[in-house]
Protein backbone atom coordinates (compact mmCIF):
# COMPACT_ATOMS: atom_id res chain seq x y z
CA UNK A 1 0.00 0.00 0.00
CA UNK A 2 1.00 3.63 -0.41
CA UNK A 3 0.86 5.80 2.71
CA UNK A 4 -0.59 9.27 2.29
CA UNK A 5 1.93 11.94 3.18
CA UNK A 6 5.09 9.88 2.82
CA UNK A 7 7.81 10.82 2.14
CA UNK A 8 7.41 14.23 3.76
CA UNK A 9 9.51 17.09 5.13
CA UNK A 10 8.10 18.95 8.17
CA UNK A 11 9.53 22.12 9.68
CA UNK A 12 8.97 24.35 12.71
CA UNK A 13 11.69 27.00 12.92
CA UNK A 14 15.09 25.24 13.06
CA UNK A 15 13.48 21.88 13.96
CA UNK A 16 12.82 19.55 11.05
CA UNK A 17 11.59 16.04 10.33
CA UNK A 18 12.44 14.24 7.12
CA UNK A 19 12.89 10.63 5.96
CA UNK A 20 15.95 8.84 7.26
CA UNK A 21 18.33 8.32 4.32
CA UNK A 22 21.26 5.99 3.69
CA UNK A 23 23.44 9.06 3.13
CA UNK A 24 22.93 10.01 6.80
CA UNK A 25 25.32 7.20 7.80
CA UNK A 26 28.44 9.26 8.74
CA UNK A 27 26.57 11.82 10.85
CA UNK A 28 24.31 9.17 12.41
CA UNK A 29 27.30 7.04 13.43
CA UNK A 30 29.11 10.05 14.91
CA UNK A 31 26.08 11.17 16.94
CA UNK A 32 25.30 7.66 18.16
CA UNK A 33 28.91 6.97 19.13
CA UNK A 34 29.20 10.22 21.07
CA UNK A 35 25.90 9.53 22.86
CA UNK A 36 26.35 5.82 23.59
CA UNK A 37 26.19 6.13 27.39
CA UNK A 38 23.28 8.61 27.14
CA UNK A 39 21.18 6.29 24.94
CA UNK A 40 22.05 2.72 25.98
CA UNK A 41 19.82 2.53 29.11
CA UNK A 42 16.73 3.20 26.95
CA UNK A 43 17.56 1.15 23.86
CA UNK A 44 15.56 -1.91 22.79
CA UNK A 45 17.47 -5.19 22.92
CA UNK A 46 16.74 -8.77 21.87
CA UNK A 47 15.75 -11.33 24.53
CA UNK A 48 18.12 -14.27 25.17
CA UNK A 49 17.90 -16.92 22.48
CA UNK A 50 16.82 -14.49 19.76
CA UNK A 51 19.65 -14.03 17.30
CA UNK A 52 19.97 -11.38 14.62
CA UNK A 53 22.99 -10.52 12.54
CA UNK A 54 24.43 -7.03 13.16
CA UNK A 55 22.95 -4.51 10.75
CA UNK A 56 24.73 -1.60 9.13
CA UNK A 57 23.16 1.86 9.19
CA UNK A 58 22.49 1.66 5.46
CA UNK A 59 20.83 -1.72 5.93
CA UNK A 60 18.70 -0.32 8.74
CA UNK A 61 17.69 2.74 6.68
CA UNK A 62 16.86 0.54 3.70
CA UNK A 63 14.67 -1.72 5.84
CA UNK A 64 12.91 1.19 7.56
CA UNK A 65 12.12 2.83 4.24
CA UNK A 66 10.83 -0.50 2.91
CA UNK A 67 8.50 -0.65 5.90
CA UNK A 68 7.48 2.96 5.24
CA UNK A 69 6.49 2.09 1.69
CA UNK A 70 4.44 -0.81 3.09
CA UNK A 71 2.62 1.52 5.49
CA UNK A 72 4.03 0.01 8.70
CA UNK A 73 6.59 2.62 9.83
CA UNK A 74 7.44 6.30 9.37
CA UNK A 75 11.20 6.67 10.05
CA UNK A 76 11.91 10.36 10.61
CA UNK A 77 15.31 11.94 11.07
CA UNK A 78 15.13 14.86 13.51
CA UNK A 79 17.20 17.81 12.30
CA UNK A 80 18.37 21.15 13.68
CA UNK A 81 19.16 23.69 10.97
CA UNK A 82 19.30 20.77 8.55
CA UNK A 83 21.74 18.59 10.52
CA UNK A 84 20.64 15.21 11.86
CA UNK A 85 20.48 15.21 15.68
CA UNK A 86 18.11 12.32 16.42
CA UNK A 87 15.15 10.26 15.27
CA UNK A 88 11.40 10.05 15.70
CA UNK A 89 9.97 6.73 14.56
CA UNK A 90 6.28 6.00 14.15
CA UNK A 91 6.05 2.21 14.26
CA UNK A 92 3.61 -0.68 14.65
CA UNK A 93 1.13 1.11 12.39
CA UNK A 94 -2.18 -0.75 12.40
CA UNK A 95 -4.86 0.00 9.83
CA UNK A 96 -8.41 -1.32 9.59
CA UNK A 97 -10.66 -0.34 12.48
CA UNK A 98 -7.73 0.54 14.81
CA UNK A 99 -5.67 3.09 12.83
CA UNK A 100 -3.13 3.31 15.61
CA UNK A 101 0.64 3.43 16.02
CA UNK A 102 3.43 3.76 18.56
CA UNK A 103 6.03 6.51 18.58
CA UNK A 104 9.59 6.47 19.87
CA UNK A 105 12.39 9.03 19.85
CA UNK A 106 15.97 9.81 20.77
CA UNK A 107 18.09 12.95 20.56
CA UNK A 108 21.72 14.01 20.74
CA UNK A 109 22.40 14.99 24.37
CA UNK A 110 23.92 18.25 23.10
CA UNK A 111 20.42 19.32 22.03
CA UNK A 112 18.48 17.91 25.00
CA UNK A 113 16.49 20.39 27.06
CA UNK A 114 15.94 22.81 24.17
CA UNK A 115 12.38 21.72 23.42
CA UNK A 116 13.41 19.91 20.24
CA UNK A 117 11.94 16.49 21.01
CA UNK A 118 8.50 17.70 22.19
CA UNK A 119 8.13 19.77 19.01
CA UNK A 120 9.40 16.93 16.80
CA UNK A 121 6.94 14.48 18.37
CA UNK A 122 4.10 17.01 18.07
CA UNK A 123 4.89 17.52 14.39
CA UNK A 124 4.93 13.77 13.76
CA UNK A 125 1.64 13.19 15.60
CA UNK A 126 -0.12 16.03 13.76
CA UNK A 127 1.08 14.60 10.46
CA UNK A 128 -0.15 11.12 11.42
CA UNK A 129 -3.58 12.48 12.34
CA UNK A 130 -4.09 15.14 9.69
CA UNK A 131 -2.47 13.56 6.64
CA UNK A 132 -1.74 9.86 7.16
CA UNK A 133 -5.18 9.19 8.63
CA UNK A 134 -4.31 7.57 11.96
CA UNK A 135 -6.56 7.96 15.00
CA UNK A 136 -4.45 7.03 18.03
CA UNK A 137 -0.75 7.30 18.95
CA UNK A 138 0.81 5.52 21.93
CA UNK A 139 4.09 6.16 23.79
CA UNK A 140 5.70 3.65 26.18
CA UNK A 141 8.34 5.02 28.57
CA UNK A 142 10.40 3.46 31.33
CA UNK A 143 9.54 5.08 34.70
CA UNK A 144 13.24 5.85 35.21
CA UNK A 145 13.51 7.80 31.96
CA UNK A 146 12.94 11.27 33.39
CA UNK A 147 13.91 13.10 30.19
CA UNK A 148 11.41 11.13 28.11
CA UNK A 149 8.67 11.60 30.70
CA UNK A 150 9.20 15.36 30.44
CA UNK A 151 8.40 15.12 26.73
CA UNK A 152 4.94 13.61 27.23
CA UNK A 153 4.32 15.98 30.14
CA UNK A 154 5.08 19.02 27.96
CA UNK A 155 2.75 17.64 25.30
CA UNK A 156 -0.04 16.98 27.80
CA UNK A 157 -0.45 13.35 26.77
CA UNK A 158 -2.86 11.19 28.75
CA UNK A 159 -1.36 8.51 30.99
CA UNK A 160 -3.17 5.21 30.53
CA UNK A 161 -1.42 3.01 33.07
CA UNK A 162 1.56 0.78 33.75
CA UNK A 163 2.73 -2.27 31.82
CA UNK A 164 4.99 -4.63 33.81
CA UNK A 165 7.89 -6.15 31.85
CA UNK A 166 6.56 -4.54 28.68
CA UNK A 167 9.67 -4.36 26.48
CA UNK A 168 13.16 -5.85 26.43
CA UNK A 169 15.37 -2.82 27.06
CA UNK A 170 19.10 -2.69 27.85
CA UNK A 171 19.29 -6.45 28.41
CA UNK A 172 16.17 -7.17 30.49
CA UNK A 173 12.37 -7.03 30.45
CA UNK A 174 11.49 -3.56 31.74
CA UNK A 175 8.34 -2.01 33.18
CA UNK A 176 6.87 0.88 31.20
CA UNK A 177 4.34 3.64 31.66
CA UNK A 178 1.85 3.98 28.81
CA UNK A 179 0.65 7.28 27.37
CA UNK A 180 -1.69 7.93 24.45
CA UNK A 181 -3.46 10.60 22.46
CA UNK A 182 -6.33 10.37 19.99
CA UNK A 183 -7.26 12.76 17.25
CA UNK A 184 -10.34 13.97 19.13
CA UNK A 185 -8.16 15.07 22.07
CA UNK A 186 -6.07 17.46 19.98
CA UNK A 187 -8.40 18.93 17.39
CA UNK A 188 -6.34 22.13 17.58
CA UNK A 189 -3.21 20.11 16.70
CA UNK A 190 -0.47 18.94 19.05
CA UNK A 191 1.95 21.62 17.80
CA UNK A 192 -0.59 24.30 18.70
CA UNK A 193 -1.22 22.68 22.08
CA UNK A 194 2.51 22.54 22.81
CA UNK A 195 2.93 26.20 21.91
CA UNK A 196 -0.04 27.11 24.09
CA UNK A 197 1.20 25.12 27.09
CA UNK A 198 4.75 26.42 26.66
CA UNK A 199 3.69 30.08 26.49
CA UNK A 200 0.41 30.37 28.46
CA UNK A 201 0.87 34.11 29.07
CA UNK A 202 0.76 34.71 25.31
CA UNK A 203 -2.63 33.06 24.87
Image: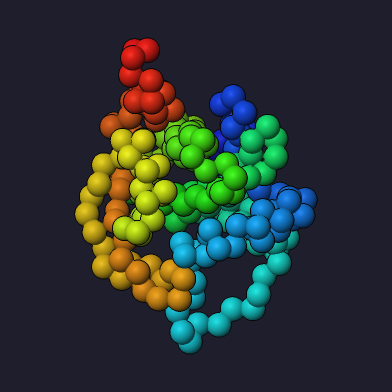
Res 60 seen here = yes
Judged left or right of residue 154, residue 109 is right
Say which of 74 and 24 sits in front.
24
Where 129 sits versus 55, above or below? Answer: above
Q: How far across and down, in percent of the image, does residue 171 sit? A: 45, 76
Residue under the image location 48 percent in, 87 percent down: 49
Where 38 sits versus 98, above or below? Answer: below
Using the rendered view, name the quadrant where residue 63 is placed: bottom right
User: Looking at the image, what colour scheme do you see?
Assistant: rainbow
Res 87 seen here = no
Quadrant containing the C terminus in the rendered view: top left
Say which of 150 and 100 sits in front.
150
Judged left or right of residue 145, residue 86 is right
Residue placed farthest to the top in the image? Answer: 202
Q: How far across and down, in percent of the image, does residue 137 sit? A: 37, 45
Using the rendered view, name the quadrant where residue 192 is placed: top left
Residue placed farthest to the left in the image? Answer: 161
Say which of 14 and 73 sits in front.
14
Q: How far across and down, in percent of the image, does residue 31 sit? A: 67, 53
Where 35 sits versus 87, above or below? Answer: below
Q: How far across and down, in percent of the image, does residue 104 sit? A: 46, 52
Where 41 sits versus 118, above or below? Answer: below
Residue under the image location 64 percent in, 78 percent down: 53
Residue under the image location 59 percent in, 49 percent down: 108
- Number of marks: 0
Say which of 100 and 155 sits in front.
155
Residue under the image location 59 percent in, 24 percent down: 13
Amino acid sequence: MTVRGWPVHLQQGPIGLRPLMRGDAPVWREVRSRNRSWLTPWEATLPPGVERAPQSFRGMARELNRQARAGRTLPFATTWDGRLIGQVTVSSITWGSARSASIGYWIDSAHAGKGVTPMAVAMAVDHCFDTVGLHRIEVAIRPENVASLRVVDKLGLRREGAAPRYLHIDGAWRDHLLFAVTREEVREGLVTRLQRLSHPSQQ
